[in-house]
Image: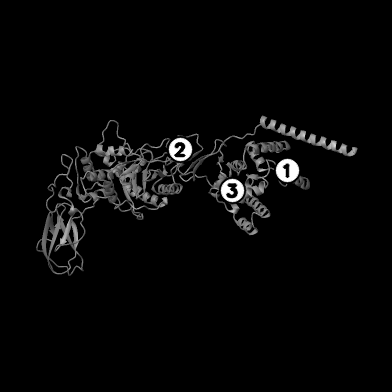
Amino acid sequence: MVKAMKIARIAAICVAAGATLAAVTAGGFLWADKAFPPPLPERLTVSTEVRDRDGALLRAFATVDGRWRLATDLDAVDQKFVDMLIAYEDKRFLDHHGVDPLAILRAAQQLVTNGRIVSGGSTLSMQLARLMEPRASRSLGAKLRQAFRAVQIERRLSKREILERYLTLAPYGGNLEGVRAASLAYFGKEPRRLSVSEAALLVALPQLPERRRPDRNPDIANAARDRVLNRMVTAGLLGEREAARAAAEAVPETRRALPALAAHLADTALRADPSAVSHKLTIKKSVQAGLERAALDAAAKIGPRLSVAMVMADARTGEILGSVGSADFFNADRSGWIDMTRIVRSPGSTLKPFIYGLAFEQGLVAQETLIEDRPANFSGYRPRNFDMSYQGDVSVRQALQLSLNVPAIQLLDAIGPARLTARFRRAGVTPELPPGEAPGLAIGLGGVGLTLRDLVQLYTGLANGGRAHLLRDGTEKTPPSTISTEILEPQAAWQVADILSGVKPPEGSAERGIAYKTGTSYGYRDAWSVGFDGRYVLGVWVGRPDAGAVAGLAGYVSAAPILFEGFARSGLAAAPLPRAPAGTFHRKREDLPVTMARFAPGDDGLVASPVAPSEPAPQIVFPPEGAHIDLTGSGGSPLVLKLQGGRAPFRWLANGKPLIEIQRKRVANWLPDGTGYSTLTVIDAAGRAASVKVFVE
């Protein structure tokens, strides 16, 4: 009995001592925890990211210390990789509180048994502690400190937060930190979906990141990956066949550059908000990548010092889907760092569609109205065509499609340059004029300064039924107060779009179903092309950033092919051009009222009655009147018809039947369909006719 009482007293003393020791230990830990808090910043220092409209990474910037460290969200990481990581590194991660006693005992036993370290006892929480408070020493004291920090971390962070921080900071070789940077550098993709082989490699790398780098030591990396795969088979996460297939895959032997799309816009976003670590643009990554490839390929063909800029926007919203500031951001010869989408340059003939639009809106002309293309003097201003030739009488439709200068200036003179620039300002675009100068007729041919973004913004009005949308790219500090405004009435916008849709694609380009206009600035310094379908507008600029002249540079030859290539590479489905709005007509010339048959501005700016032509009447000079034509010895060759005088274009008739389409040349061919008398007639643009009667033998 006495013995039992002694044993009970000893047990009670032990319990009390144990409790006291536990209390002292707990109290000591709480004191130490408070006195020596862990280095747990509320937000890790990570790379600044610029993302597209859907959250895809466009461009990342290294941290101040030169690291690629991308913030990681566990939901954006393949669950298969996470399961493999926990099974390989810390299989009781979800159950322990920072330190795994069983893992420590196992590691100690293996050390005693084998005389060397076979496996470590560090948990993921302990590894996170080492990453956040790196120490060169691997002593017992350093391990105890990591264990203490791990328990502290577990008291402050959830398991999810611990995993996310580990996956953000884990080393993967070189200046790569975190699973996202490693996946992008080694596989060229985000770790959202990884193959078994890829996941196993990413699990293996952080243990010895420099030694196992696949781009430098592929054999060592391959062996480390295979060890992970074997462990997963043992743990029951993989079948042997699945592991064998994964082991058969080669590890990547090159390191890719991290995404660097939309470089100029990314820089703009950083300047607009330097403190933000994530910026979201309106850009669509696939569109941006396609446009950048098109610009780079085009620049390689056009010359070493020339650059290419492109802007693609959604005409219905004004959101920019792709913006290429230069053909190669890192190319010094092309001054690639300059964002040419924002540089003011002369737009050449790209403003002509808006001149015609205002003329349609005011009822001055219809598409088939005749207008003169001849040398003209507008109070000392004498515009000339690009090819220095003149076409005579042309329809308004032809004048715009051929981009003739004199007809455009005639219309601008009638509507007034101030009215044109007022419409531009209404659409949020302010043309840049020389200081102190009022808008003049020269603005119709590029005598004004605009940017590529300005042009695309104006053209959204042509693609969107007359309503131009203010462009937005996501870098704006404040949203625009006005989203869209009417630049042209819907009927006028449709007339212009209908005309431009009839311009033939440049040689070698496939038909796309777009309407487009080209332009070349004075001195061959800038080549432009702006096109649109029923949804998207794309603008292209080609030239030298230093504004140097380039022989042979022209909108149709240099910029238009890039426009069609850009549409093709954007990956966007073509949208049909808008239908004609109610009350819109495309009348034939013979159906036009007499006041619209020919454009002739009067003093009041309105269309005056038709004027008498100044040229002599047409005269058929061959064959002459009464000639006998013997075609039996010609082998069936046609007879050449010639005329003098008259106003182009001309229509030829044989016995009242039209021979060919209306043409501008004064020479035509006629193949009689039989012998006997025939009457040949020619009618010029002024309605004057000449006839001869010949006999075919």
Looking at marks 2 and 3 on the same chain, the residue that comes earlier in the sequence is marked by: 3
Q: Amino acid at mark 3?
A: Asp
Q: Nearer the viewer, residue 354 or 14?
A: 14
Q: Which residue is mark 3?
A: 215
Q: Quadrant of residue 138?
A: top right
SS type, badge 2: helix
Looking at the image, can residue 632 be seen?
yes
Q: Quadrant of residue 246?
A: bottom right
Q: Which residue is mark 1?
A: 101
Q: Are marks 2 and 3 in contact (CB under 8 Å)?
A: no
SS type, badge 3: loop
Tell me the quadrant of the picture where the N terminus can be found.
top right
Pointer 1 local density, CA inside 10 Å: few below 14, some 14–19, many at least 20: few
Looking at marks 2 and 1 on the same chain, the residue that comes earlier in the sequence is marked by: 1
Q: Amino acid at mark 2?
A: Ala
Q: Position of residue 241 (x, y in %)?
A: 63, 59
Q: Which residue is mark 2?
A: 269
Looking at the image, can residue 217 be seen?
no
Tell me how far mark 1 sits from mark 3, CA to CA: 37 Å
Q: Position of residue 590 (x, y in %)?
A: 17, 54
Q: Position of residue 330 (x, y in %)?
A: 46, 41
How many marks the image carries: the answer is 3
Looking at marks 1 and 3 on the same chain, the residue that comes earlier in the sequence is marked by: 1
Report the colour scheme. Answer: one colour
Tell me how far mark 2 sits from mark 3, CA to CA: 33 Å
Q: Amino acid at mark 1?
A: Pro
Tell me how far mark 2 sits from mark 1, CA to CA: 49 Å
Q: Position of residue 578 (x, y in %)?
A: 32, 51
Give the left or right position of residue 646, taking residue 147 as reference.
Answer: left
